[in-house]
Image (cartoon, grey):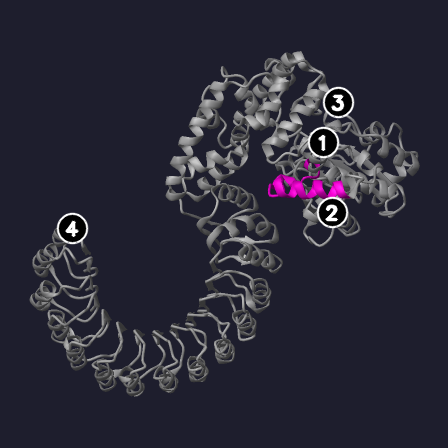
């Protein structure tokens, strides 16, 4: 085989480049614009390398699979050029290249010798020897298997092994691909995903098309001026890069071709997908040199064909069907829009253009599709961007350019679409279907009408936009909507993989939001600086990154970027942080410009070492921290020593800390109590829920309550085994005239009736400030809780909230309960869940609650009530059951 002739034929044949059909492979290679695409499996290298590796292996068949326009044909051409140039695959002496579109057009019977002769205009002189002696030196390349309409299943053919035997084309190909004919030869097949490929074995390589770095290389190759290339590429990524079809090399060719024309003419580049296709259609019409009437007729005919293909889910139409749509008048003009298949059928070069011309036809011709909703319903499930294009084309700024080429759009169609769009959007946003919310935002993004966004998403009605599992495209639409609405209360995004591209898009929305929630997200390291910059530059006061596993390394980057931020709250709960990150946080907290007041670090194993670093920051006058939440952070008594020192430093502004779920123990609390008695300590709220405490530490707490310097107003001792003796000491301290406690939580503290008796005495003593008392899960029964009912009825009692959930109450307590409710002038909330009250208790409780209009809520859930009792409870608005 003469490789020079083969090379010349490969580099001079092929379809002409068309703006929608793509650049011909020969043109790509000749102009040195070839950019290799990636492939899977492997995913590390490019398709070219993967094919070469596979062809050198033991498998004799390699199938390259990818969507239309993904670069398969160009990659195969490049491989053939490299073979003919002596650069690769030199273990093959002969390479035969075929396109299924051309093979499929022949319905005659033929043999292998004739097939090769048809493709190469001559019979190889050593044909017999190749077939019989050296088949392993032959490579057959078949491109476009999806275009072949006949079955290649071996079971439907009588396979042949004779290269001179006349058989059908499908039988000949099946004999080759299934190893009956030319056994030992190698086959390289390219196809779109199709059922036909299932019958072919071998290695499968999936084309991954152009990722962002490859798109950038493509733009640099296309535009000679590096500055123009960079500007064009950045514009494309900003406005279109979030669409999945941007990975198609063919689409990149289309975009570059249009951008080149617009840049050369000094025209503004399109801001949306709809605007891009307006520019494409206008260009195609101008190149056809048709008058306005014929251009309008062409687009309407294409619209009818597009509707037929979409509605009936046909990818192509016969020549007869095309004539029926009215395209016979413009048959010489349709090459720009349609491609001809080997069997004579026609289809659109681009599925996107197919949907776009249908949208244009809708606004041009009211007689075909009068109603927008019916139009979309007729094509539901088979069109992906029809509503996008209709939304974009409903705005004058986008359709006016088309009117210059096609004539006037129908004002009634535009009015009808806008009316439908507004009503459907308002209905959608009242529901909880997030996918429908996204769709609404996408349509608003295409319309590019700020006043329409404000009209549909009235800020008071939609103060918070919450989204999860966002794609790049969703983020672009969401960001457009938020930037139109302006500064807002909250941006909430969850369960989303946040790459640099996503953060680049969302950055303006972050800056406009007072509270930014990125919870349960996978946040990549390279987007952390962008996040910090957006937070620092805008109105953000609270940043919530809870359950987004950052780790120490990412947090270090975040801290470095937040020094100029105006944050008041930072939530880093469940972020996989350990002790080393606390040094970075301490540096941030002591930065003079940093104003953070609330830090949440729950469920991060920072340990004593990490917490000590945070305590050291509190010694600095620059540290503004007022609240610190360190629940379940693996802290011990050693942490309390460091914390006590910080509280007494005179610099700490901390007023609230929650140590829930740490094993600080009695010794830790005793160390802390020394600080709580100091005049410099400002702590008002202390959480010691489940800290392994016993009654032994309550003597120290009693002294704190009796100290004249104590300012502690909230104390949570829940889930600690305090016992009777210790709890009585606590009560003694609570009786002190100087005790400032207003909120006390003693849930599940192993309290006894004697302790409840003493607590009742505390509540009645005249100096007690307690307004909220939680005594749940202490099984003292009716007799124990009676002391609290008696106290509640006393005029000195200030209780506004009381919980006696799961304390073993029965109907025997109802008389005392009702008397207490009638007598109390302060109680607003009463928790009686999970007790043993029955129907007998209901009439009296309902009666007293109807009298007590100042009571906000009485919770009776999970008691032993029948359906009849529940109906009676339902008559009282302030009872929950």
> What x and y, as percent, mark residue 226?
78, 43
State the extent of the magenta-drawn residues as a range. Answer: 227-251
Query: Which residue bears the numbered disc 1?
Result: 266
Q: In terms of depth relative to the viewer, which is nearer, 496 or 351?
A: 496
- Near mark 1 (Cα within 10 A), the count class, few <14, some 14-19 or many ≥20, is few
Q: CA distance from mark 4 to mark 2?
A: 69 Å
Q: Nearer the viewer, mark 3 or mark 4?
A: 4
Q: Nearer the viewer, mark 3 or mark 1?
A: 1
Regarding mark 1 in the picture, which secondary structure is present there? loop
Q: Residue at x 55, y 58 (%)?
A: 536
Q: In terms of depth relative to the viewer, which is nearer, 465 or 42?
A: 465
Q: CA distance from mark 1 to mark 4?
A: 71 Å
Query: Residue 47 — which label?
Result: 2
Query: Which residue bears the numbered disc 3?
Result: 108
What predominant SS class does the magenta segment belong to? helix
Q: Nearer the viewer, mark 4 or mark 2?
A: 4
Residue 162 appearing in the image: no
Please indicate whether residue 212 sits to the left or right of residue 185 in the image: left
User: Which label's residue is closer to the chain start, 2 or 3?
Assistant: 2
Q: CA distance from mark 1 to mark 2?
A: 38 Å
User: Which label's residue is closer to the chain start, 4 or 2?
Assistant: 2
Please indicate whether residue 466 sits to the left or right of residue 552 in the image: left
User: Which label's residue is closer to the chain start, 1 or 2?
Assistant: 2
Query: Residue 536 — which label?
Result: none
Q: Nearer the viewer, mark 2 or mark 3?
A: 2
Q: CA distance from mark 3 to mark 1?
A: 54 Å
Query: Which residue bears the numbered disc 4?
Result: 874
Q: Is residue 246 magenta?
A: yes
């Amino acid at each position: 085989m003469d490789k020079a002739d083969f090379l010349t034929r490969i580099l001079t044949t092929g379809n002409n480049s068309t703006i929608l059909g793509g650049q011909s492979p020969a043109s790509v290679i000749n102009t040195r614009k070839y950019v290799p695409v990636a492939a899977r499996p492997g995913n590390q290298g490019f398709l070219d390398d993967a094919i070469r590796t596979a062809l050198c292996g033991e498998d004799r068949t390699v199938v390259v699979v990818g969507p239309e326009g993904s670069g398969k044909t160009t990659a195969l051409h490049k491989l053939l050029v490299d073979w003919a140039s002596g650069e690769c695959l030199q273990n093959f002496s002969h390479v035969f290249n075929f396109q299924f579109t051309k093979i499929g057009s022949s319905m005659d019977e033929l043999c292998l010798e004739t097939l090769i002769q048809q493709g190469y205009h001559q019979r190889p002189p050593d044909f017999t020897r190749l077939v019989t002696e050296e088949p392993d030196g032959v490579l057959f390349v078949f491109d476009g298997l999806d275009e072949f309409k006949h079955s290649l299943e071996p079971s439907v053919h009588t396979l042949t092994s004779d290269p001179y035997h006349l058989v059908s084309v499908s039988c000949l190909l099946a004999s080759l691909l299934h190893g009956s004919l030319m056994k030992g030869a190698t086959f390289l097949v390219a196809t779109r995903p199709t059922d036909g490929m299932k019958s072919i074995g071998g290695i499968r390589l999936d084309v991954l098309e152009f990722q962002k770095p490859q798109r950038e290389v493509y733009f640099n190759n296309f535009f000679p001026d590096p500055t123009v290339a960079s500007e064009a590429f950045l514009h494309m990524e900003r406005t279109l890069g979030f669409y999945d079809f941007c990975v198609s090399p063919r689409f990149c060719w289309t975009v570059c071709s249009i951008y080149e024309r617009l840049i050369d003419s000094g025209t503004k580049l399109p801001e949306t997908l709809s605007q891009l296709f307006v520019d494409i259609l206008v260009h195609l019409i101008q190149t056809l040199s048709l008058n306005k009437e014929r251009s309008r007729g062409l687009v309407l005919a294409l619209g009818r064909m597009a509707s037929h293909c979409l509605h009936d889910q046909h990818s192509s139409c016969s020549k007869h069907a095309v004539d029926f749509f009215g395209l016979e008048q413009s048959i010489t003009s349709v090459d720009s829009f349609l491609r001809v298949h080997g069997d004579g059928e026609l289809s659109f070069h681009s599925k996107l253009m197919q949907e776009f011309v249908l949208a244009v036809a809708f606004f041009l011709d009211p007689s075909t599709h009068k109603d927008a909703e019916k139009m979309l319903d007729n094509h539901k499930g088979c069109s992906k961007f029809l509503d996008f294009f209709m939304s974009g084309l409903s705005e004058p700024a986008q359709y006016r350019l088309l009117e210059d080429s096609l004539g006037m759009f129908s004002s009634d169609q535009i009015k009808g679409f806008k009316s439908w769009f507004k009503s459907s959007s308002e209905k959608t946003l009242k529901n909880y279907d997030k996918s429908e919310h996204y769709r609404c935002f996408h349509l608003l993004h295409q319309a590019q009408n700020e006043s329409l966004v404000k009209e549909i998403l009235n800020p008071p009605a939609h103060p918070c936009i919450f989204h999860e599992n966002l794609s790049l495209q969703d983020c672009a639409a969401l960001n457009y909507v938020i930037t139109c609405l302006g500064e807002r209360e909250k941006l909430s995004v969850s369960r989303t993989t946040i790459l640099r591209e996503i953060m680049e898009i969302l950055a303006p929305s972050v800056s406009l939001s007072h509270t930014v929630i990125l919870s349960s997200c996978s946040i990549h390291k390279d987007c952390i600086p962008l996040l910090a910059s957006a937070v620092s530059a805008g109105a953000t006061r609270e940043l919530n990154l809870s359950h987004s596993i950052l780790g120490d390394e990412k947090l270090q980057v975040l801290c470095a970027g937040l020094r100029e931020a105006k944050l008041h709250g930072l939530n880093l709960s469940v972020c996989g942080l350990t002790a080393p990150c606390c040094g970075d946080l301490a540096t941030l907290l002591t930065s003079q410009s940093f104003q953070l007041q609330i830090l949440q670090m729950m469920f991060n194993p920072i340990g004593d070492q990490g917490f000590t670093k945070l305590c050291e920051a509190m010694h600095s006058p620059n540290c503004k921290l007022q609240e610190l939440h360190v629940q379940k952070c693996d802290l011990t008594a050693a942490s309390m020593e460091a914390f006590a020192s910080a509280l007494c430093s005179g610099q700490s502004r901390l007023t609230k800390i929650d140590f829930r779920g740490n094993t600080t123990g009695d010794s830790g609390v005793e160390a802390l109590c020394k600080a709580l008695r100091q005049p410099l300590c400002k702590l008002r709220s202390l959480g010691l829920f489940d800290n392994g405490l016993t009654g032994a530490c309550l003597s120290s707490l009693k002294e704190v309550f009796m100290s004249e310097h104590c300012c502690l107003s909230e104390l949570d001792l829940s889930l600690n085994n305090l016992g009777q003796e210790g709890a009585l000491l606590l009560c003694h301290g609570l009786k002190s005239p100087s005790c400032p406690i207003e909120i006390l939580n003693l849930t599940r503290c192993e309290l006894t009736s004697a302790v409840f008796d003493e607590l009742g005495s505390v509540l009645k003593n005249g100096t007690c400030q307690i307004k909220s008392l939680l005594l749940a899960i202490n099984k003292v029964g009716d007799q124990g809780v009676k002391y609290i009912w008696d106290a509640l009825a006393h005029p000195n009692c200030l209780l506004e909230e009381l919980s006696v959930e799961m304390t073993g109450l029965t109907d025997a307590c109802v008389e005392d309960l009702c008397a207490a409710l009638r007598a109390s002038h302060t109680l607003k909330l009463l928790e009686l869940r999970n007790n043993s009250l029955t129907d007998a208790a209901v009439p009296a409780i309902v009666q007293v609650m109807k009298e007590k209009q100042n009571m906000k809520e009485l919770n009776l859930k999970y008691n032993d009530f029948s359906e009849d009792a529940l109906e009676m409870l339902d008559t009282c608005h302030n009872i929950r059951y």
